[in-house]
Image: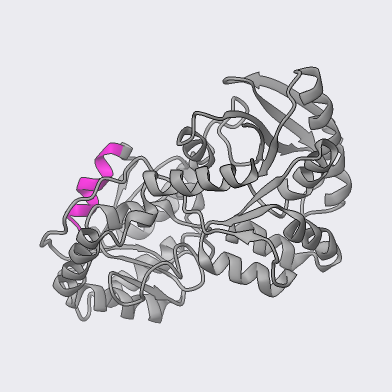
Amino acid sequence: MRILHLSADFPDPLVPAKTRAVANLLDLVPEHEHRVWSLNRVGRRAGISALDFGPGHRALAYGAPGKGLWLDTYLARVADFVLEDAARAGFVPEAVHAHKLSVEGLVGRRVAEAHGVPLIVSSQGNTDLKIISARPDLRPRWRAVWQQAAVVLPFAPWTGEGLTRLLGPRTGAMHWLPCPTPADTLHPPRESEAVLTSAFHLAGHANKNAALLMRATLAAARQVPEVRLQIAGGGDAHAFAALARQAAEHPARLSLLGPRAHASMPALFNASAAMPLPSKRESYGMALVEALMAGCPVLYSKGTAIDGYLEDGAVSLAVAPEEGAVTEGLVRLLRENAAFKARLAGLQESGGLERFRRRAIAATYRDVLAALG
């Protein structure tokens, strides 16, 4: 099948450091022909320009104002450009996959309708719910995408539930599709010291609630004196400086590890008591799944990330992203660590994490594409 992909989250020569979530998904099904139009919003007066990269992909820099102003108008121009660009390349898609509902979905609907082919829409809870909630005037447009798409693929159950509340029940197919990670080898849990290991790109430290997590760790130390928090991640000097000042006040309790090679993270998680990520917003949180695969229980914010996939309180805790709730969750994970890890070992052995592994995600995506054929 020839698939035209629209994504603002695909690494390209213009913004190489984007997440590899979409790229990893396409790598799972190489038997199909994938052409990606990678979208990068720039200043309003910039127009639209494109650059070749990869096997037939195009990196777009398109002008549009921020804060969603004239969103539909400017994205209609992007859709027209993509249609002309694909025609010049002689690429005629058999399906269009928009990798977000709120932005790419508006482009994808126009492109799919012009070609008379099915539209697939992925949905990311963080961006999609935030934008759609903020623009009730555009909700009829998003409702049309939501209803007319052949299939919708939310990253997690809570995302589908949130979109249903905003846009109404869907009549078509909807399947949860986790983000694949290369680090999906299972590592049995083992006994560890009271070390908490969090991991994220430091540029997102405010959304990841890093300062709150540090304060919650200090508060948890009143009940679990041996607790330590280490944060892996780099990529932002200003964020590093801000967090380093806070960590320097409690060097025996808080530390910044800097960037770590992705291949080294399973061992780091496996030697930890828990992986906390109490983000304000989180579409999926691949690091949480990687920690579970590595034998490390996790904590995340309720109504975000992987919420809805797992029984709360078994191998994970979903808490409010508030200092008191996070502190309480950390204390519970540390005091009951042996029980959490015993349940995680059982979940790994029984196949309870299979839905998060590449082979299962590939099978779901293949089935979706086959159903369109």
How is the protein colored in the picture?
Answer: one colour
Residue 201, visible in the rendered structure: no
Expressed as whole percent of the image width and height from the top left, the position of residue 16 reads: 54, 30
- Residue at screen point 40% across, 49% down: 360
The correct choice, above or below, for 302 with respect to 38 in the image is below
- Residue at screen point 49% across, 46% down: 238
Quadrant for residue 5, please give it: top right
- Residue at screen point 23% across, 62% down: 350
The correct choice, above or below, for 43 with respect to 286 in the image is above
Expressed as whole percent of the image width and height from the top left, the position of residue 100 reads: 65, 50
Q: Residue furthest left?
A: 191
The correct choice, above or below, for 267 with respect to 284 in the image is above
| Along the viewing direction, whichever of 234 and 349 lies nearer the viewer | 349
Quadrant for residue 310, please give it: bottom left
The correct choice, above or below, for 130 with respect to 330 in the image is above
Is residue 19 part of the magenta span, yes or no? no
284 to the left or right of 147: left
Expressed as whole percent of the image width and height from the top left, the position of residue 285 reads: 44, 56
Q: Quadrant of the C terminus?
A: top right
The rendered magenta stretch, by its main secondary structure, is classed as: helix
| Along the viewing direction, whichever of 115 and 25 lies nearer the viewer | 115
Which residues fall within the magenta stretch?
263-272
149 to the left or right of 77: left
User: How many numbered discs sit on the rendered protein?
Assistant: 0
| Along the viewing direction, whichever of 56 and 227 lies nearer the viewer | 56
258 to the left or right of 294: right
Is residue 268 part of the magenta span, yes or no? yes
- Residue at screen point 54% across, 38% down: 18
Residue 204, visible in the rendered structure: yes
